[in-house]
Amino acid sequence: MHPRTVSEIIAAKFTDCVRRAVSCQLSAIEVIAAAEELTRCNESALARELYKLWIAHNPADPLLHAINFNYGVLLNESGQLADAQAAFTTAIEARPDFLSPYINLGTLLERAGNLDEAVKCWLEVVNRLPTVTADALKHKTVALKQMGRVLEANGRPDQAEAMFQACLDLNPNQRDVLQHWIAVRQTQCKWPVLAPWGSISSSMVMQALSPLSAAILIDDPVLQLANAWHYYRQDIASSLAQTTAGGWPTSGARGSRRLRIGYVSSDLREHAIGFLTAELFELHDRTNVEVLAYYCGPRTEDELQQRIRRAVDHWIDISDLTDQQAASRIVEDGIDILVDVNGYTKDARLKLFSLRPAPIIVNWLGFPGSMATPHHNYIIADQTIIPPDAERFYSEKIMRLPCYQPNDR
């Protein structure tokens, strides 16, 4: 008798679990364990199917809310967003004081553009805090952070500030939240912007300052460079498990094919960057250059984005990809020059660039300051953006144009 393959063992276990689930002989703890094992074996589809069958045949189980939540997480990961939303809603209906699905449901509502409903969902977490436990406080912190972020993005900085401050009152050791708090105070012209309060010291505020906020507050180029370097070290480099995606061809391996230029941006839409660059993509010399756009911004079908999509050779939406997945895609595409159009601005994919998915990485347009990273090789500028006597304050090699900013005619 030949030993069974891994696939056969998994199939046998799945069949047994299904048999027990439909006859109400598989406990909630057992179905969670089985689904987790299937997921670890790259059989998420079977895990989803098992959860679905168990839910259908065990409607009175006291842990039904937890199973629906886990089912929703798997549906969300597979891109089945409407079904995931339904699963999270069912989990909430089954047990309204179970906080986890409120967080996930709010995120799905935000992605669908239902921002007010998303905020209401997270507000439920804040208002329903049942007891002061570590888990409950964690959920409240996440909900306040999410609400602040959405309110900030939708032009309600005063409300966003209140959410961020409440979030920091619960846990002051959140650099990202403190950065957003500084940004919304700048938006409101609240002086002094970097005001300490409670357990937030002046030192914590200064160390949390992002390069974009620093560019507004500080006019000393040495301090701006130091700030960018500190930000990169603390927020980007420290969280990287590896430093390179690797695998790109050497410069001599390109042969006679066209030069492949990739643009990574969250702003190729009705945004200042989109309005400036639309014609640039149309004017690239297609006999020598192949243009790929890697979009990482909000979903939109506006007219300007449609125009840019028509102008490039390839449009790749990387919004739902992890940094590693996006970097691997860029490597597979054989990009020769990768242009970071965001820099240190909203929705930037900074960790993606730290994986070095292309042999040459260029900082251009979105953030005219230095990135202060080891992987941004060049910055495109002009005499106004970077005067000759300011070159020493940039980690990148400076490539000058008569005017670094394109303008759509």
Image: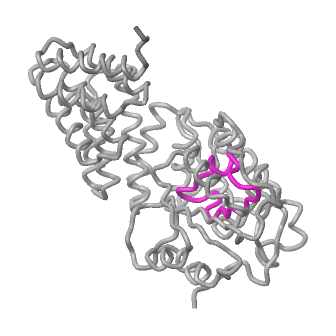
Is residue 110 left or right of 219 when viewed as pictured? left
- The tally of labels here is 0
Q: Residue drawn 65% across and 33% down?
A: 241
* Residue 37 x, y percent position in the rendering: 38, 20
Q: Residue drawn 48% across and 59% down?
A: 317
Which quadrant: the C terminus? bottom right
* Residue 276 x, y percent position in the rendering: 58, 80
Q: Nearer the viewer, residue 85 or 79?
A: 79
Outermost residue on the left side: it is: 60
Q: Nearer the viewer, residue 191 or 340?
A: 340
Is residue 335 left or right of 250 when viewed as pictured? left
Segment tinted magenta in the rendering = 338-361
Q: Is residue 67 magenta?
A: no
Q: Residue drawn 37% across and 40% down?
A: 77
Q: Residue drawn 62% across and 58% down?
A: 333
Outermost residue on the front side: it is: 1
Q: Is residue 353 magenta?
A: yes
* Residue 401 x, y percent position in the rendering: 79, 80
Q: Would residue 126 be visible to someone looking at this image?
A: no
Q: Quadrant of residue 141?
A: top left
Q: Quadrant of residue 378?
A: bottom right
Rendered view: 52 above or below 387: above
Is residue 207 left or right of 188 when viewed as pictured? right
* Residue 240 x, y percent position in the rendering: 65, 37
Q: Quadrant of residue 300?
A: bottom left
Which quadrant: the N terminus? top left
Rendered view: 160 above or below 57: below
